[in-house]
Amino acid sequence: MSTKKKRVVVGLSGGVDSAVTAYLLKEQGHEVIGIFMKNWEDDDDSEYCSSNIDFVDAASVADVLGIEIEHVNFAADYKDRVFAEFLREYQAGRTPNPDVLCNAEIKFKAFLDHAMRLGAEQIATGHYARVRFNQGTGRHELLKGLDPAKDQSYFLHRLNQQQLSKTLFPVGELRKTEVRRIATEIGLPNARKKDSTGICFIGERPFREFLNRYISKEPGPIRDERGRVLGQHQGLSFYTLGQRQGLGIGGVKDKGAARGGGDHAPWFVARKDMAANTLWVVQGHDHPWLLSSALEADDTSWVAGVAPTPGAYAAKSRYRQADAPCTLAHSGAGGAFRLDFPEAQWAVTPGQSAVLYDGEVCLGGGVISSAA
């Protein structure tokens, strides 16, 4: 990290990671300004998602650290750039990752632009990732955070060279336990605040109940691999591949139907047939319908600005999984690519991101279009 003193605008979310980020930058002598981003307005005062509470926490942190804080409303941008795409994907039967889109469109675009208007030289967030300038290539690299349990490079893989050149991730150099220790030591009011889960506009609320407000229900049959109707789904948009809970067919048991499962093996969503409005389910976590040895992805974004050369890499096809060895091949127009895995991957889901890694370097990725 540069020793030159700069004006740095920090995204203060009300959480402990961004609070410690601001503290570390101030300790390094930078002029630090905090910005609280309000990204959602619909039912914002509900029990599930209240940015008011988070803003109070962020303002308390700013007070303790002795820095200015500004409240900025990006809700219109969020609805246009993130939420509209989120709904489009769900209506098409895919499962999008709005956190990836939010980082690319809001936190490192709308927020970055706003910070630059405030005269910032750089921005900083509380993400667990790192940025390194590679002298050999003359490019910025996105690296995994040092805490493997908290690494968030997957969610940041769509950032480009211009965005990375302006961004600092101070807590990416630390483990979460160290971040909490620092917060406690300096008396931050949110030192023990629970980590937020999921995306703000959904929060802890029942997901199906939330989507119900925006997507119409089209019930249809739930079938097993033999084609037998086991029940009725509430609309294909409300289910995702690999889903186990909330299928409403827990009482259906049949030894013959379970491959490697047995009569009490749980049911999993394995396929969604949009044309026939049919949800296909299987018994047993390792059923062949849940395993894929290859995937195709489009809507690509590469950190270096150019696609990596075909060959051996590692990839994640969902956030909470270990890197899986794979072979990259480019597969046609528009920068689409294919990944082949020597070991089959579980519940590869269209709409999710396939993110490529070369060791600790996150290269970028694309949106999964199909799996085989």
Image (spheres, grey):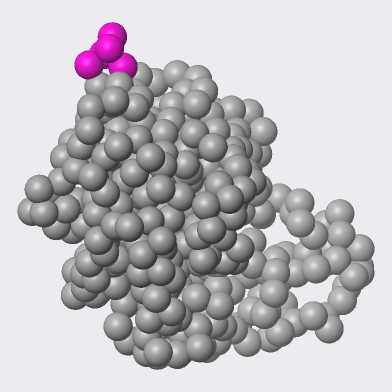
Q: Nearer the viewer, residue 208 or 334?
A: 208
Seen at 41% across and 69% down, the residue is 60
- Nearer to me, 65 or 47: 65
Estimate the x, y position of residue 157 in percent, counting from the top left: 37, 41
| Image height of 257 relative to 52, above or below | above
Depth check, front residue: 333 or 359: 359
| Relative image position of residue 158 (x, y in whole percent) | 31, 44
Where is residue 302 shown, x and y percent of the image?
30, 34
Q: Which one is in front, 277 or 180?
A: 180
Residue shown at 22%/33% (left/top)? 5
Q: Which residues are magenta?
A: 134-138
Whether residue 234 appears in magenta in the rendering, the answer is no
Q: Residue at x 38, y 81 (%)?
A: 52
Quadrant where the image shows the N terminus: top left
Residue 357 vertical placement versus 178 (above, below): above
Q: Is residue 273 above or below residue 32?
A: below
